[in-house]
Amino acid sequence: AARPGTAVPSPETLGGVFLCGGCFCSADAVAGIGAEQEVENLSGLSTSPEKDIFVVRDNGTTCLMAEFAAKLTVPYDVSASNYVDLITEEAEIPLSRGAAVRGKCGTADAELQISWLDKVYTLKLYFIKEGHNATKRQEAVWKMNKIQFVYDSSERTYFKDAVNPGKHTANSHHLSALVTPAGKSYECQAQQTISLITSDHQRTVTLLLSEVRIQPFDIRADFVFSEGHKCPVDEREQLEETLPLILGLVLGLMIVITVCVYHIHHKLTANQVQIPRDRSQYKHMG
């Protein structure tokens, strides 16, 4: 469902001071007021039962779009049969279709927050945009620079008899994922694995992403992704699929050329006088 934010009042510039709501306020105060943003969960439109679709709109214009299938694997302890030792189990937590969504867009940063099962689980994705750097010979790109997952192991749907249940937070560290040229969307059908570390540094939570199409910046048309930037795995798989076809076409072309050359050669030599190899036959010539 859409979650409208707070609309920005239309300010009138009065020499560096703004008139808003009938009162004078500084430019810094106006900058702190967020633009109207609404978020929609369009997962019901997805053709894949595992893929979710989320859209963030700013003042009626799409500013962030995300499509992906996600699942989190979370290790937790349960008591062994002797009730003394502990055994590590894994909870596999899929992203729910009816998730609540929040998000925000900016010129250089963006955020998508997804919560499900009454906010027992919350997945936060953070994106930043980096400008052109002539010194490093780096073109403008955007990337996902942080992921946070909040969960409660006392929830019984995915955690069965967890020892010392409670709320936990897992974060990525020094993340630089989905690096994409500015103005393009990131596209990757292959499964990607991202590791998150719990705040007590004792557990590694695994985020599995697949069927990904994301664009958090520079969307030119409403509800339409810009040109896709394929991940290396998809490019390699595409090359592996097309390479046999290319080799087959080249081989077929070589065979056709060989047959044509032979045919032309045969026609050119068919009408030539055959010189006898036996010299005794030379006296009959002429």
Image: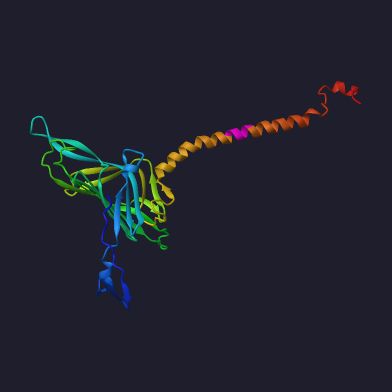
What residue occupies the far right of the structure in this picture? 286
Q: Which residues are magenta?
A: 251-255
Counting from the top left corner in percent of width and height, residue 265 is at 73, 32
Q: Magenta stretch: residue 119 in it? A: no
Splitting the image into 4 quarters, where does residue 35 fall? bottom left
Counting from the top left corner in percent of width and height, residue 101 is at 26, 50
Splitting the image into 4 quarters, where does residue 88 fall? top left
Which residue is at the front of the view, 233 or 118? 118
Is most of the magenta stretch helix, strand or loop? helix
Q: Quadrant of the C terminus?
A: top right
* 178 sits left or right of 274 in the view: left
* 271 sits left or right of 214 in the view: right
Residue 174 seen anywhere in this rendered image of the structure: no
Counting from the top left corner in percent of width and height, residue 268 is at 77, 32
Residue 116 seen anywhere in this rendered image of the structure: yes
Q: Residue at x 28, y 54 (%)?
A: 103
Q: Magenta stretch: residue 253 in it? A: yes
What residue occupies the far front of the structure in this picture? 22
Counting from the top left corner in percent of width and height, residue 277 is at 81, 23
